[in-house]
Image (cartoon, rainbow, N blue to C red):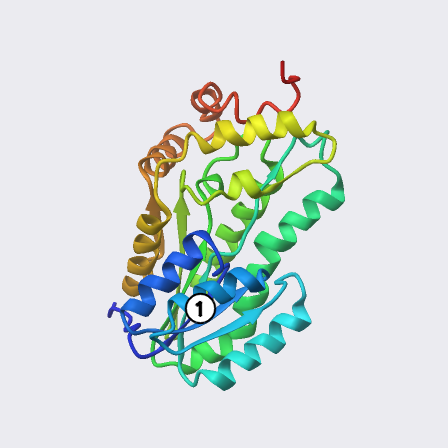
């Protein structure tokens, strides 16, 4: 399969205002790619756009849960960028809490953000991607799309679904010019867990303790993860692991598909404890 040429064509990036999305934008701008940057945070998105002003860049403030707005933004992007050949979906959030603690509304919110936002922007831009001679879609999944820990039901639910969507779409498009891949990061220091949501039923101090315990396990810098994402897009890879932990968990799940939690339980004990009061 030929490598995708990103220089001189347009890459659409969701979740571009912070973390991996922002770093992906900066890397691609340095390579001469044109950019369409999407995020719900207008102020942070403007800062990222200003930092990549050396290239052609448009910004689009959008709530990816709003299907009508997503399809309208897709029209704006294709009008401003005649050649779109890459989509990288970095938008997402997290949610702490057990099934007993979480409400249906809280879980639906996260699935809407992580899954349906990804599906919506992909569907909206698919005609433009199919019109390109070659194109690639990179969906950001998670190590929790490989293994599902306790205390992360809505997050694992949404990311397993992103994985399934990516794989099914790759098969659906196998006879076209568009290829699809998913990226599985583990432990990237983006702050997602510290700035993510938690069930309203959880004591805020307990939630902060669990989030901090999770953040302490993160070792990969966002810029390093972004470089892997860009390379996966350029090489049109169907599956990319980021971080040593992702490779270990992938192997563990293959070896013990119904018993892997036994090996993960102790290291993650503090990260999934959303009930013990803070002393």
* Residue in the picture at 69% in, 36% down: 199
Q: Quadrant of the C terminus?
A: top right
* Residue in the picture at 75% in, 46% down: 105
Q: Quadrant of residue 178?
A: bottom left
Q: Is residue 132 above or below residue 170?
A: below
Q: Between 113 and 40, which is closer to the camera in this rendering? A: 40
Residue 133 point in image, percent of width and height: 34, 81
Q: Between 86 and 147, which is closer to the camera in this rendering? A: 86
Residue 239 point in image, percent of width and height: 36, 52
Residue 150 appears anywhere in the view? no
Outermost residue, left side: 2
* Residue in the picture at 47% in, 35% down: 147
Q: Between 147 and 270, which is closer to the camera in this rendering? A: 270
Mark 1 highlights which residue? 49
Outermost residue, top side: 279
Q: Quadrant of residue 250?
A: top left
Residue 132 point in image, percent of width and height: 38, 81
Q: Between 129 and 45, which is closer to the camera in this rendering? A: 45
Residue 169 point in image, percent of width and height: 48, 63
In the displayed structure, does residue 189 sit left or right of residue 119? left
In the displayed structure, does residue 234 sit left or right of residue 19? left
Label 1: element kind: helix
Q: Quadrant of the N terminus?
A: bottom left
* Residue in the picture at 31% in, 72% down: 6
């Amino acid at each position: 399969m030929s490598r995708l040429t990103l220089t001189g064509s347009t890459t659409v990036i969701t979740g571009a205002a912070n973390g991996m999305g922002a770093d992906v934008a900066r890397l691609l701008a340095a390579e001469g790619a044109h950019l369409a940057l999407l995020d719900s945070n207008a102020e942070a998105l403007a800062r990222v756009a200003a930092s990549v002003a050396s290239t052609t860049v448009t910004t689009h403030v959008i709530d990816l849960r709003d299907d009508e707005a997503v399809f309208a933004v897709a029209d704006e992007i294709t009008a401003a960028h005649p050649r779109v050949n890459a989509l990288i979906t970095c938008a997402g959030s997290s949610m702490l809490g057990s099934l007993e603690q979480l409400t249906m509304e809280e879980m639906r919110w996260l699935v809407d953000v992580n899954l349906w936002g990804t599906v919506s922007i992909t569907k909206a831009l698919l005609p433009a991607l199919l019109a390109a001679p070659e194109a690639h879609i990179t969906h950001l999944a998670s190590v929790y799309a490989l293994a599902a820990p306790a205390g992360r039901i809505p997050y694992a639910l949404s990311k397993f679904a992103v994985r399934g969507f990516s794989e099914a779409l790759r098969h659906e498009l196998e006879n076209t010019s568009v290829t699809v891949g998913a990226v599985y990061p583990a432990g990237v220091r983006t702050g997602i867990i510290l700035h993510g949501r938690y069930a309203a039923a959880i004591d805020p101090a307990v939630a902060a303790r669990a989030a901090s315990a999770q953040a302490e396990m993160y070792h990969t810098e966002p810029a390093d993860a972004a470089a892997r994402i860009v390379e996966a897009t350029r090489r049109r890879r169907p599956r990319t692991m980021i971080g040593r932990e992702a490779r270990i968990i992938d192997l563990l799940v293959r070896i013990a598909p119904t018993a892997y939690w036994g090996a993960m339980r102790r290291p993650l004990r503090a990260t999934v404890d959303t009930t013990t009061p803070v002393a």
